[in-house]
Image: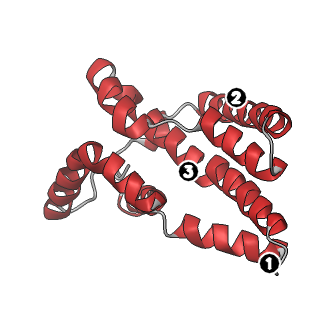
Amino acid sequence: MARADLSTIDLTFMFGMTISKGLVLAIACLVYSQLLSGSRWKAAALGGLLAVCSNDIAFGLPIVDALHPDFGIYVVLLATVQNAVFNPICFVLAETGQALESSSSTATCCSVLRKTACRLCTNPAIVAVFAGFAANLGLGVDGLPTPVDMLLTTVGDAFSCTSLFALGMGLA
């Protein structure tokens, strides 16, 4: 992200993909909340996550980079939208369902949102992308010092091999 040329991004395409994914999420939440038994909130969250979550960076990015390297930035940006927008919506639905199910819970709307926001702000995938954006905007496309660029390239190359492990550890 730090070396991406942000001026080449087609915002219409990004907006269209975001709206499409949002519609799929909304439809899946509605359908699953009606089909699954138990808490409608948690069923909607599960259905939404199952419908829109994909492992784009671990599996899709190497394929896209091999076939059409210019489109790799779209995979990263759409995965960021997924992690920053759609996953938190599902997490809030699940946390709300959990709070409503436990009668002894004193969880308020504000506490559920705070808990989800805290998890979101400590998500390494989101922190890394926003750090890349900040570096790109602050230093420009070629502005990273060579040692930092080499270190980040090495870490980025290792990410696709370790991403599923990191995902599992994050869910545990």
Dot 2 falls on a residue whose secondary structure is: helix
Residue annotated with mark 2 = 20
Q: Callout 1, which amino acid?
A: Ser
| Residue 160 point in image, percent of width and height | 28, 42
* Residue 37 versus residue 71 in the image, above or below: below
Residue annotated with mark 3 = 83
* Residue neighbourhood size for the residue with mark 2, other residues' Cα within 10 Å, grouped as few (<14), some (14–19), many (≥20): few
Q: Say if mark 2 contacts mark 1, CB within 8 Å.
A: no
Q: Mark 2 or mark 3: which comes first in sequence? A: 2
- Choose between 161 and 131: the one closer to the eye: 161
Q: Say if mark 3 contacts mark 1, CB within 8 Å.
A: no
Disc 3/disc 1 C-alpha distance (Å):
27 Å
Q: Residue at x 63, y 42 (%)?
A: 49
Q: Residue 131: name its quadrant.
A: bottom left
Disc 2/disc 3 C-alpha distance (Å):
16 Å
What label sits on residue 35 in the rendered view? Answer: none
Left or right relative to 88: residue 122: left
Left or right relative to 56: residue 3: left
Residue annotated with mark 1 = 105
